[in-house]
Image (cartoon, coloured by chain):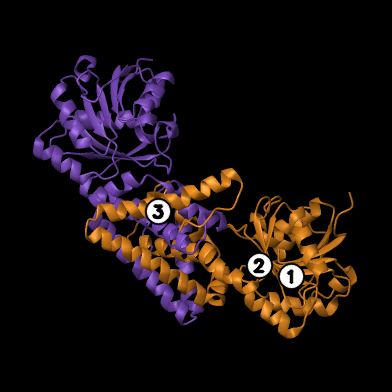
Chain colours: A orange, B purple
Amino acid sequence: MTPRFERAAVIGLGLIGGSVARDLASRGTRVAAYDRDAQQLDQAVRDGVVTDVLDESLSAVASIDPQAIALPVDAAIEMLRRVSSLLSGARLITDVGSTKASLQREVEALRLTANFVGSHPMAGDHRSGWSASRGGLFEGAPVYLCRASGTTDDAMRLAEALWSDLGARTIAMDAREHDAQLAWTSHLPHMIATAIANALARQSLWRDDLGRGGKEMTRIAGSSPEMWTAIAVDNAQAIDGALAAFEEEVGRMRAALARSDAEDLRGRFSAARAWFEHQENAYAEGRRPLHLA
Amino acid sequence: MTPRFERAAVIGLGLIGGSVARDLASRGTRVAAYDRDAQQLDQAVRDGVVTDVLDESLSAVASIDPQAIALPVDAAIEMLRRVSSLLSGARLITDVGSTKASLQREVEALRLTANFVGSHPMAGDHRSGWSASRGGLFEGAPVYLCRASGTTDDAMRLAEALWSDLGARTIAMDAREHDAQLAWTSHLPHMIATAIANALARQSLWRDDLGRGGKEMTRIAGSSPEMWTAIAVDNAQAIDGALAAFEEEVGRMRAALARSDAEDLRGRFSAARAWFEHQENAYAEGRRPLHLA
């Protein structure tokens, strides 16, 4: 079978970029790659995934002429400027960052490319780097796709095809809406896991002391501080809003505890279980859940 | 091999009691059981785990004369009074509740039995009932053992042997110390998971919208409201203290977000990862972690 892209470039071989590279290579795409960590890049070549090595200038990207470029880096805008000036043949340029609005604003302001589509695969892990990457990471994962004002329909369709090929479920969403929602669904849990870890550390209590539930709740506290600092600063206002609403819920529970109000507490635990079971049922029935009024 | 207990009684065939019954039966112990849900009890008989069915009076327990009794019920003290008046031959009576101090106070006040040891197996699940129970649930699980003032050394050794037989790792701990620690390591995560679920429900955001981390963080929101109401009320003060300390951590993160203070945020994410990795290292090295000063 002819691969959808004969050649692709992947800039940054971390968990996400590395897994994209593995999946593309296993589907017959010839992968060129750059990573600031030369050892990771070498390992990716030795692992038979990366065929062409790019240096920091990315200038070789012009001669390789890839058809798709993934930019899974904090400095995505820098890389994007560099590669877009070097490229004519790329039908698709995408990033894989966790926030989408600020990058898109820069893309639009700079009129960098009509072939740019922002991607956010929800396939994170607390582990990072090439060693954490693996084939099949995106099987069943949601991938948010955000088109810029100048993005062509072709580029959007190609982004959908790229991620569908990798087994993901694509969801088109406005970049600002994406960031507002992810503040709740991804960034809020992360901030909370961090706060739990640090509160327990002050008590000299460790992950080994936790039950299964507590261990699960703090797994993502082991994630990359660099990546999460960038996300938190980029989406600070929305995250703060989600934390404020969460604290209101905590406050309601603390008030019920102070009153030893079993009825109130039971109501909150029951509402949480209804939310959970609604979801479980929705999974089972293969449809989106309705809003619990 | 002769089983450690020829006969045992299990009062309440939920996740924990049911799993105890399964493990005992598979090791050759003849199991008598009671459950307020007659269907669950019938199913446990059909599944070949329970041999003798007890009615609500538990009076038949006298003729069965079990050597060990597990009381995995909210109404443990009621059951304990009833069985202790009926029994002469039991060498061990234990409960499996998540809080230990209040039951122990009652046991001591009533001088119910010298053979009572409080047990708390950390092997919970958001699912409950006989259908959720399974053999091997306690393999590798920590089980806290709390002796009352009148508990004999023999009973304590027998409790350790019972749980060790089932693959658990026993940890002897003062009942009040247990409740103070579990407020942090078990009850705090549960309250937080509940608050996350209810905050997301108010936003019409569902578990399906979450990434893997968020899904893990809200699994225990699906737990039994009845069980958790009892735990929360019983240990309200300690749980509130843990929530207050947790909120201080959240407050520090919100302050950093408001200032867009990347350095401060990075420090908090890094501290959380250090806590996480310290633990991962401690696991690998097979020893308890040191306190991060």
Q: Amino acid at mark 1?
A: Val
- Select label 1 or label 2 by which is in front: 2
Q: Which residue is mark 3?
A: A271
- Label 3 chain ID: A
Kindly identify the residue that appears in the image at 10 percent across and 34 percent down.
Answer: B111
Q: Earlier in the sequence, mark 1 or mark 2?
A: 1
Instruction: Report which quarter residue A192 is drawn in.
Output: bottom left
Give the answer, above or below, for where A113 lies relative to A247: below
Q: Which mark is residue A117?
A: 1
Q: Which mark is residue B201?
A: none
| A55 or B24: nearer the viewer | B24
Q: Quadrant of the N terminus of chain B?
A: top left
Q: Amino acid at mark 3?
A: Ala
Residue B6 lies, in percent from the top left, at: 30, 16
Mark 1–mark 2 distance (CA, rounded to whole Å)? 11 Å
Q: Which residue is mark 2?
A: A173
Q: Quadrant of the C terminus of chain B?
A: bottom left
SS for tag 3?
A: helix
* Category of crowding for the residue at label 2, using alpha-carbon neighbours closer than 10 angstroms: few (below 14), some (14–19), many (at least 20): some
Residue A254 lies, in percent from the top left, at: 29, 62
